[in-house]
Image (cartoon, helix red, strand yellow):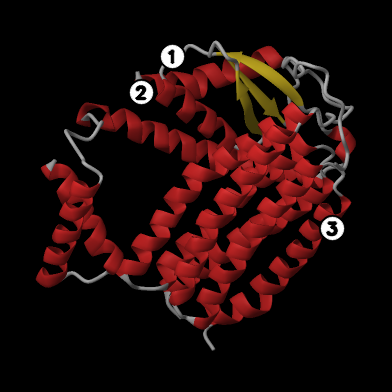
Amino acid sequence: MTLLAGLALWVALPVLGVALLLTAARIGLGPSLPDRVVGLDLLSTLGISVVAVVALASGNDVYIDVAIVLALLSFLGTVAFAAYLERSR
Amino acid sequence: MSVRELLAAVLMLAGVATAFLAALGVLRMPDVFTRLSATSKASTLAKMCIFLALAIAFDDLGVATRALAAVAFVFLTAPLAAHAIGRAAFALGVPLFPGTKVNEMPRPQGNVQADPDP
Amino acid sequence: MLVALLLLTAAWVALTGEVTLANFLEGAVVSALLLVLVRFRGRLGFRLSKAPKAAGLLLYFLKELLLSNAAVARSILRPVSSLSPGIVAVPLDLTSDAGITVLANLITLTPGTLSLDVSPDRRTLWVHALDVADPDAFRREVKEGFERRVKEVFE
């Protein structure tokens, strides 16, 4: 195993896992709906990071396309949430 | 071990550290706006670092172009998403952190009450 | 028109990562079809004389991004009571849609500040900042740092 793949597996992924738990805590705590949307947005960023780190760990470049598509979709999701929130008042 | 691999590793770890800081920020900050401040740029920087690490680690023109396109896309969309959430939060009347020093923005018309969990 | 076709073809070749004549021709055909499909007319809205100023803006932005990320990291790690956030109204000298959009996005991307809204008459930009000790100094900083540079490029 190369150094890069080792670091990705044993350092980057565990740290991202803890970050995911912290963000999940914020989504659970709220207190308002926009807070949860901020949490979801960060959750998608962390998901993209996980996919990209898996690409580095495995050396398989197919995962890069997955990360890019996730980035495109999460932006649409966040904006849709925000538009819904603004209209719902 | 090559210089390229080392550079990719450093960029990846910097990106992961920034992402972790963003998660810590979203948990610790006191109101929506400070949380948005903490997450929107930290997550932009994190995504930039990790995609650059990808571009460097794979010695391939196609991968590098796609990674750089992703970075450009993140730079274009991240502020828009943050702006959309911030505006929505303000329009909903989400309360500001009590320690807020100044507020020069008028409250939304119609005196909307903050609804903690609709 | 020809410039747009060349740029699209170059993007195709770079994205597929195959620098061969066959791939180049394939990219040219796809790009031409694309331009016909979107009914592309005229030219790209970019003047070459603005390129140095645009590069300067980009460099200034990258510097701000890296330098002040440390400040946000510090405010995340410090106790919450030491924060002094606020919403500041920044008067705008910019008038064009493109200029205001770029300024608002740059403000959001630099750490510690977040553009919330533009007033309906487009004279004021409301910015949320993590640390406003002095609103007037903050206003001056935005106007003399980012707005001047954006104005040079976009207006």
- Residue designated by label 3: A25
The label on residue C154 is 2
Disc 2 is placed on an element classified as helix
Could you tell me residue A24's position as x and y percent?
Answer: 79, 60
Are circles 1 and 3 on residues that touch, CB within 8 Å? Answer: no
Check if mark 1 and mark 2 are on a common chain.
yes
Check if mark 1 and mark 3 are on a common chain.
no
Tell me: B81 left or right of C49.
right
CA–CA distance between discs 3 and 2?
43 Å
State which quarter of the image contains the N terminus of chain A. Answer: bottom right
Q: Is residue A26 above or below residue A84?
A: below
Could you tell me residue C96's position as x and y percent?
Answer: 41, 18
- Residue designated by label 1: C95
- Amino acid at circle 2: Phe
State which quarter of the image contains the C terminus of chain A. Answer: top right
Kindly identify the residue that appears in the image at 74 percent across and 43 percent down. C74
**Disc 1 crowd, CA 10 A, few/some/many (<14, 14-19, 20+):** few
The label on residue A56 is none
Could you tell me residue B91's position as x and y percent?
Answer: 73, 27
CA–CA distance between discs 1 and 2?
10 Å
Could you say which is closer to the camera, residue B48 or residue B74?
B74
Disc 3 is placed on an element classified as helix
- Amino acid at circle 3: Ala
Disc 1 is placed on an element classified as loop
Are circles 3 and 2 on residues that touch, CB within 8 Å? Answer: no
Q: Earlier in the sequence, mark 1 or mark 2?
A: 1
Q: Chain of mark 1?
A: C
Q: Is residue A32 above or below residue C143?
A: below
Q: Nearer the viewer, mark 3 or mark 2?
A: 3
